Each structure stands twice: as C-alpha cells, then as structure tokens.
C-alpha cells in the first residue's frame, strides 16, 4: 500500500480536476446511490473508506447535510484536500490510516467507498468486507462504487481498451494521461459476482449491483 500512498500523494492537488476525464460516467457513478440514502432517515453517521479528496462524501453531504462524516484514507495529502473541501463544517472528521491493515474501531449507519477497494488483492477484499459488516450497526448500509473485472476476457479487454481510448481523446494533458495509465498498473480488479458473493459470505443479507457502466459499478449491501 505504500506505493499506492505515494502515487496518490503526488496526484492529490490535481485529483479532482481530472476525475470527469477519467470517469466517463462520473455523475451517475457517484449519484446512483442517493435514492437508497434518501429513504433511510435513521442514518446518522457515515464512514468513507479510501475517501481521497472527499468527492463521494460531498455527493452524499449535498443531499444529507445532517449526517456526520468520518473520512479515512492512507494518503495524508489527499485528506488535506478533503479538509479544505469541508473547511468550517463541524460534522466532518478525518483519519489517516491504511484501511486494509487495521480494524474499524467505531460503529456506523452507512459505510461508503469509491475507487479504493480495487487496490486490494481478493483475499484482502474479503477481509475488508468482513470488517465493514462488523462495523455497521443493525440495518446498516454499505455502498461500494468501484471498478471490476469483466465477466470474460473479451469484455474485460473491451472495457479497458475503451476506457484508454476515451482518456486519450480527452482534454487531459499528456503528462496527466501518462500518470493515470501508470496508476492503473496497481489495480487488482475482481469480478462483480465474486465481490457480491464475498459480501454475502461476510453476512450481508441483501446485496446487488445498483449501477453499471462498462467496468464501473456501484454495489449495495444491507445488514439485517
């Protein structure tokens, strides 16, 4: 994870400006979970795992400014941007920590993650999903917006090559494109079905994929 930490420390200042170029389905990707959150008035506190600069938390905050947010990330520089984003708001706190190597100390109503868990090997994904389940209160909700491996080699290659073509055609500077392509070498995608099964094995009683665009997906899982 130290390599990932270094990569994201370096890109932290430009991370937000590059997101819409690197996530072709940006709005739907981050907003598809909002109806699930909106209908759960009992939610009080949120943990954002691998929060980065706080984009996912901001999306939910804009709908539910009453919630209390804890943003956790391994990159101090990314969290520095998040602190600036939410400066002056009393319902935000920040934890610099490797979420893959440490238990989750508190209990939450909602745990979210975006584009973070795909950096873990499959066995570590399964361990994290167990920790997330244990950290959720009864009736809690977990939302993971991430990238997954295609169901076949053909579709996986299509998703990856199409994404690269889209990024190459974007307005990103060549240096930024090169760095993005370098970062994806650290990715460890797993199939959607594999991860839904991991969530069920962890104890979640109701799981599904609520959004999919190529290999960008949003998974949701409820704890009874």
Image: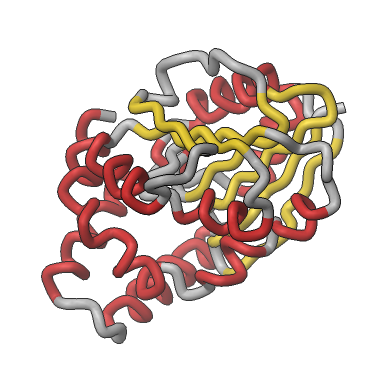
* Residue toward you, 20 or 81: 81
* Residue at image coords 47%, 71%: 158
Q: In this image, 109 relative to 40: left or right?
A: left
- Coloration of the structure image: secondary structure
Position of residue 43 in the picture relative to residue 166 (left or right): right
Q: Quadrant of the N terminus?
A: top left
Q: Is residue 78 above or below residue 99?
A: below
In the rendering, at what x and y percent does residue 40 appear? 83, 45
Image location of residue 5, percent across then percent down = 24, 36
Relative to the observer, which residue lies in front, 19 or 161?
19
For the C terminus, the image quarter is top right
Q: From this viewpoint, is residue 151 visible?
A: no
Q: Quadrant of residue 14?
A: bottom left
Q: Residue furthest left?
A: 175
Q: How many marks?
A: 0
Q: Position of residue 12 (x, y in %)?
A: 24, 51
**Would you place residue 29 above or below residue 147 in this image?**
below
Q: Is residue 220 above or below residue 1?
A: below
Query: Can residue 172 be seen in the rendering of this structure?
Result: yes
Q: Is 202 positioned to the left or the right of 65 in the image?
A: right
At horizontal 37% and vertical 47% (from top left) the residue drawn is 87
What x and y, as percent, mark residue 72? 43, 32
Q: Residue at x 61, y 27 (%)?
A: 129
Q: Is residue 141 above or below residue 115?
A: above
- Give the residue at x 18% y 68%: 176
């Amino acid at each position: 994870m130290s390599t990932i930490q270094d990569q994201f420390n370096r890109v932290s200042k430009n991370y937000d400006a590059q997101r819409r170029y690197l996530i072709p389905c940006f709005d739907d990707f981050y907003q598809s979970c909002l109806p699930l959150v909106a209908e759960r008035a009992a939610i009080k506190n949120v943990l954002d795992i691998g929060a980065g600069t706080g984009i996912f938390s901001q999306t939910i905050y804009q709908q539910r400014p009453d919630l209390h947010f804890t943003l956790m990330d391994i990159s101090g520089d990314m969290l520095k941007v998040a602190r600036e984003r939410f400066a002056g708001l009393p319902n935000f706190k920040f934890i610099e920590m490797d979420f893959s190597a440490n238990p989750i100390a508190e209990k939450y109503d909602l745990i979210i993650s975006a584009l973070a868990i795909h950096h873990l090997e499959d066995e570590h994904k399964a361990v994290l999903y167990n920790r997330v389940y244990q950290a959720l209160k009864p009736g809690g909700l977990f939302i993971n917006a991430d990238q997954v491996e295609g169901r076949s080699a053909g579709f996986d290659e299509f998703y990856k090559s199409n994404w690269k073509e889209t990024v190459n055609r974007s307005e990103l500077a060549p240096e930024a494109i090169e760095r993005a392509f370098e970062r994806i070498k650290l990715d460890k995608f797993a199939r959607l079905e594999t991860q839904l099964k991991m969530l069920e094995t962890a104890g979640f009683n109701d799981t599904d994929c609520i959004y999919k665009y190529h290999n960008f997906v949003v998974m949701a899982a409820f704890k009874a």
